[in-house]
Image: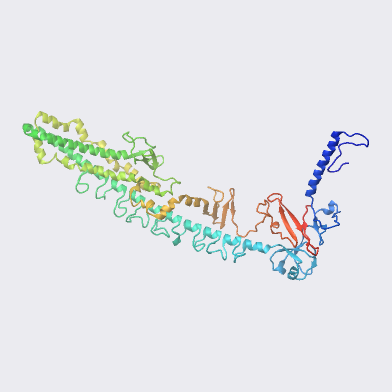
């Protein structure tokens, strides 16, 4: 005995002995066969027990006849071979014989909704609405509803919801509506989108008064206050000047504080304090080397006092030789002379120290970061030099022993609030005047050598001892010290601020390439500090610079699709094609406003289709979806009503 489930393992003859292992093999084979049969039985299509006697359902058609057909139920619930889910008959027409499962589109007779209907009762058509009301047709696919959800723009689709097109490009109830607004309007609209907020484009580059100022205005507007925040000014205005900043009380641009003259109607620029001629208190250059006249109306320059000291010393030497007969009387004046000598030497030392202090803070032009100052000493905090390799001014941070750029990189450009962090540097430049003032403050002591009383006293210096003492002023070492400010080398050093090269270095602060770098120089001026400390909106921009930069990287407007700095999810508005696009990681895709969207059988169906998502079960028919997300199937169940009838349905088979 053999079949698809069991093949006999041994041969048995009546009256003979059977081997145990053979019998066991047959028994095991029977168990396996039973399990296989039971498994297949469980997988079989079953019908409910509907009383006795049970009826066998059999389809006798061969494979060729069954091809492209479907197994279905007739009007009594019996299985039969049918012609598939439905037969497409095109647009519904009157006086036409329709059979079960014929499928039509309603056409003008049904209001041209393009809805699909399936015939559930064979009949000859009369009037479509009458036949539909008589349950001869059943809605199979509501195309009109799908179309409304896709592109209706003249109001709601259902309840308070609107179509995809309305939310994409606008429509009644979405455009300029509180709590709503279309995607296109949120991207590029010029006015209020939802009656309260503005579009991305408006916040980026618009001029609406109530936005608080666009990013573009805060970046580059120079013809007045930022639109929507007229008391605030742009980064460019604070950097290079603009209406409301240039020559304005308590303001002034960074460039003006670096290279201008009278900046905020009361204070002068760093350059003016260094080499200018209009500062009433005198510039650093004037205090160092002005040859004649007072610097500030009362005091003289270091060079003037040094020259005067040298002249007095020479006159003293001549008087000493002529007064040899008065040696005894001059003894009482020796101490005073020695004091005058000390004062002169101290003045010379102070002047040299003042120059050395400046030389320690501005190191000149170099091709790389120095590790020591020009005297081979340790670098001081705030020291400056101009790097010719990168064409940028550098400042030394002693706390971190690091040379820092004064010109921001592209990444640092947005961090304007760093201006206030280096205020000590400009203070150092202005602080030089106090050192020079200290030299001028010694004018009285130096002048003692030339007053009549001292000359009289010095005239009695004739003794050998006193002559020796007085000649100290004429020895090579002392003369060298006294002449420090007058020698060619020292004069050249003092003239550093006035030479073309140094002026060019100082003017570096005013070149277009280094305008931003000069923000650092202006950091010590209280008015400029308002860029980072006093203006709330500028501070907000700096605090949220990551978000601002992120927005600029995520959304762009251009005449062509961007090709650089691409990230999945980026948005771009192409002004040539007038299309809003998104980047999917490999290509730009247009966000279209009128597209038929495929609907899947379920949320995790990997293959979407137009029909399955809109299947409607007929009377006494139910659907059960199986194997979600994989090889999905539908179980279609029909239950007879009390009259023993059911609506015919079918399961499509492959051909």
Identify which residue is drawn at 30% across, 39% down.
Answer: 359
Colouring rule applied to residues: rainbow
Image quadrant containing the N terminus: top right
Identify which residue is drawn at 28% across, 39% down.
Answer: 357
Q: Looking at the image, which is closer to me, 245 or 176?
A: 176
> Can the viewer see residue 240?
no
Identify which residue is drawn at 24% across, 49% down.
Answer: 281
Total tally of numbered discs in the picture: 0
Above or below for 55 versus 92: above
> Can the viewer see residue 650?
yes
Residue 274's image quarter? Answer: top left
**Where's residue 170, x and y in %?**
56, 62
Query: Which residue ends up furthest to the top in the rendered image?
Result: 464
Q: In this view, does 193 lie to the left or right of 357?
A: right
Above or below for 307 versus 55: above
Q: Is residue 621 left or right of residue 181?
A: right
Residue 286's image quarter? Answer: top left
């Amino acid at each position: 005995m053999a079949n698809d489930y069991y093949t006999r393992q041994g041969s048995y003859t009546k009256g003979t002995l059977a081997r145990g292992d053979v019998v066991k093999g047959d028994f095991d084979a029977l168990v396996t066969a039973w399990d296989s049969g039971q498994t297949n039985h469980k997988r079989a299509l079953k019908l409910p027990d509907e009383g006795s006697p049970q009826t066998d359902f059999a389809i006798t058609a061969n494979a060729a006849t069954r091809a492209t057909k479907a197994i279905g139920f007739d009007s009594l619930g019996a299985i039969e071979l049918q012609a598939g889910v439905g037969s497409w008959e095109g647009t519904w027409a009157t006086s036409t014989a329709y059979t079960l499962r014929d499928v039509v589109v309603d056409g003008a007779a049904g209001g041209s909704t393009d809805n699909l209907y399936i015939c559930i009762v064979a009949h000859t058509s009369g009037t479509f609405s009458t036949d539909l009301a008589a349950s001869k047709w059943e809605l199979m696919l509501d195309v009109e509803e799908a179309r409304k959800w896709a592109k209706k723009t003249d109001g709601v689709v259902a309840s308070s919801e609107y179509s995809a097109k309305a939310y994409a490009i606008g429509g009644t109830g979405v455009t300029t509506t509180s709590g709503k607004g279309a995607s296109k309007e949120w991207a590029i609209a010029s006015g209020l989108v939802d009656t309260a907020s503005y579009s991305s484009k408006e916040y980026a580059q618009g001029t609406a008064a109530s936005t608080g100022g666009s990013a573009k205005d805060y970046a580059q507007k120079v013809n007045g206050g930022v639109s929507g925040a007229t008391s605030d000014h742009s980064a460019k205005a604070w950097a290079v000047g603009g209406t409301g900043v240039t020559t304005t009380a308590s303001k002034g641009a960074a460039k003006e504080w670096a290279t201008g003259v009278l900046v905020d109607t009361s204070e002068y620029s760093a350059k003016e304090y260094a080499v200018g001629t209009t500062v009433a208190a005198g510039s650093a250059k004037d205090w160092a080397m002005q040859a004649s006249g007072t610097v500030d109306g009362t005091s003289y320059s270091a060079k003037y006092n040094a020259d005067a000291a040298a002249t007095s010393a020479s006159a003293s030497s001549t008087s000493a030789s002529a007064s040899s007969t008065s040696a005894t009387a001059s003894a009482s004046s020796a101490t005073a002379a020695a004091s005058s000598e000390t004062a002169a030497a101290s003045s010379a030392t102070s002047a040299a120290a003042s120059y050395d202090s400046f030389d320690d803070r501005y190191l000149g032009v170099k091709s790389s970061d120095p590790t020591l100052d020009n005297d081979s000493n340790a670098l001081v905090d705030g020291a400056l030099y101009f790097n010719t390799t990168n064409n940028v001014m550098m400042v030394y941070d002693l706390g971190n022993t690091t040379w820092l750029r004064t010109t921001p990189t592209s990444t640092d450009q947005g961090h304007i609030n760093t201006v206030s962090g280096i205020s000590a540097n400009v203070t150092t430049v202005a602080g030089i005047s106090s050192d020079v003032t200290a030299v001028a403050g010694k004018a009285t002591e130096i002048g003692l050598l030339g007053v009549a009383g001292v000359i009289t006293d010095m005239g009695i210096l004739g003794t050998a001892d006193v002559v020796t003492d007085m000649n100290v002023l004429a020895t090579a070492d002392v003369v060298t010290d006294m002449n420090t400010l007058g020698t060619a080398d020292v004069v050249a050093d003092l003239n550093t601020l006035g030479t073309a090269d140094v002026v060019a270095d100082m003017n570096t602060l005013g070149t277009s390439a280094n305008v931003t770098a000069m923000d650092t120089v202006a950091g010590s001026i209280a008015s400029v500090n308002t860029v980072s400390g006093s203006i709330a909106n500028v501070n907000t921009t700096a605090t949220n610079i990551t978000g601002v930069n992120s927005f600029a990287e995520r959304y762009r407007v251009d005449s062509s699709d961007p090709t650089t700095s691409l990230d999945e999810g980026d948005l771009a508005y192409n002004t040539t094609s007038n299309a809003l696009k998104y980047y999917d990681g490999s290509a730009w895709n247009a966000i279209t406003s009128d597209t038929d969207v495929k609907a899947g059988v379920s949320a995790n169906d990997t293959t979407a289709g137009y029909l399955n998502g809109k299947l409607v079960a007929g009377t006494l028919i139910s659907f059960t979806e199986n194997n979600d997300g994989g090889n999905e199937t539908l179980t279609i169940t029909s239950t007879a009503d009390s009259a023993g009838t059911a609506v015919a349905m079918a399961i499509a088979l492959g051909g």
